[in-house]
Amino acid sequence: MKTKSLICGGIAALIVAMTTSAQAETRTLRFQSAYPASSTIYTSAETWAKRVEELSGGRLKIEFMPAGTIVPAFEVLDAVNKNVIDGGHSTVAYWVGKHRAGTLFGDAAGGPFGMDILDYVGWLYEGGGIELYRDYYRVELKTNIEVIPSVTSANQALGWFARPVESWADLKGRKCRQTGVTAEVFASSGMSTVNMPGGEIVPAGERGVIECAEFVGPAEDMGIGFQTIWKHFYPMSTHNPATIVDFLVNGDVWNSLAPDLQAIMQAAASEATLRSHIRKGKLDADALDKMRNEDGVTVHRTPDDVLQNILASWDEIAKKESENNAFFKKVYDSQRDYASKVVPAKRLIQAPYNLGADHYWPEAK
């Protein structure tokens, strides 16, 4: 009996020790998004935080907060760098003014070079893009940040308008919300562009500060109320077809994490990217149905010359930038090299999407 008691006591002590050790290793990190809580991008990022906790067995928890909780949306990068917050979730387009090459990391027109979101993610992980992305933050911006690409907002819509858009020239004089280099792409049409984070767009539209805006797409835009202001929507565009956003982690915080926790955060980010992309398809379809049938929105096909001029305008901007910015050129050349192989091959391998769509779901004349 004495031996049995000793064994039981030893096991109990071991369980207590293991429990205490696990509790001691538990970390909680504070992350703030640049997106409002009503955003599907925000909810997709919350899914990531939940998966990190699940996959780590509760050892790592992410306290996830919407835009403005601690700092304004445009200050997330600096707040992470200075360790005001442990991490953030945002788009590189919000600080492309710090370094122009930022637009190539998910916010470039045409993919770029015809890449869709899967091609772009392929470039990141199979074409050396992730190393360049880390260099962008660490070397070019000189920040103490680890970047983890996660959650897609592709393909982004042309936007919402108070009156219909007939052509590229018809954009002249319109005062629209645009961000990053995308604003310059549309400025070449004569559009007057205004930069603001997503959570400020609807209030600006209500006050008449802007008469049109682009943000993400049907479901995302309706989630924050675009349909209550503008009644002409153009879902098709070529200005941001492969957009992805990022988790930014303070470098010291990142280095303090055990290697398996780092791997869990990265794996959960890849999962969140895929899940956000496949979820978006159904959400957008439902949103298009609702805006047409309940909200009085007219959904238009974007004029072909708008789609083509977006690409032409971007090509001119990228050409000039490559001539004056060595890092921009390095990234752009890497994307061109990857796309030159993948895009033509995909076009040869895959039947055009419209072939099956027109066969089973012909558009009404």
Image (cartoon, rainbow, N blue to C red):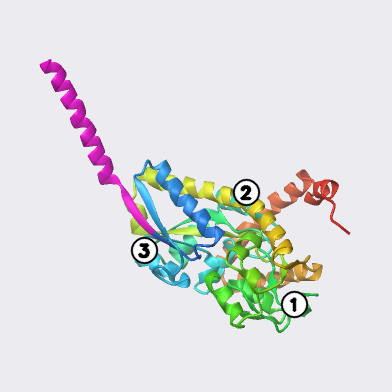
Crowding at dot 2, Cα within 10 Å, few <14 / some 14-19 / many 20+, comes out as: few
From the viewer's side, name the closer residue of 80 and 16. 16
Would you name the residue on which mark 2 appears? 278
How much space separates mark 2 and mark 1, taking CA atoms? 31 Å
Q: Position of residue 122 (x, y in %)?
A: 61, 49
Task: Indicate the quadrant containing the N terminus: top left, top right, bottom left or bottom right.
Answer: top left
From mark 2 to mark 3, how far is it between C-alphas? 30 Å
Mark 2: amino acid: Ile
Q: Where residue 327 sits: x, y (%)?
A: 54, 66
Question: Mark 1: few, some, or many residues within 10 Å (few <14, many ≥20)?
Answer: few
- Name the residue: 23% across, 32% down: 15
Q: Element type at marker 2?
A: helix
Quarter residue 240 falls in: bottom right
The amino acid beneath tag 1 is: Arg
Asked if marks 2 and 3 touch (Cβ < 8 Å), the reply is: no
Residue 39 horizontal side relative to residue 146, left or right: right
User: In x, y percent, where is residue 10?
Assistant: 17, 26
Q: Residue furthest top?
A: 1
Instruction: Report the front residue among 184 and 75.
Output: 75
Q: Is residue 300 above or below residue 148?
A: below
Q: Earlier in the sequence, mark 2 or mark 3?
A: 3
Residue 348 vertical position relative to residue 285 in the rendered view, above or below: above
Q: Quadrant of residue 233?
A: bottom right
In the rendered structure, the answer to whether residue 285 lies left or right of residue 276 reads: right
Residue under circle 1? Answer: 163
Q: Is residue 322 above or below residue 272?
A: below
| Stretch of the chain drawn in magenta | 1-30
Assess whether residue 9 is covered by the magenta stretch.
Answer: yes
Residue at far left of view: 2
Please, is residue 96 above or below residue 131 in the view? below
Write down the residue under mark 3.
85
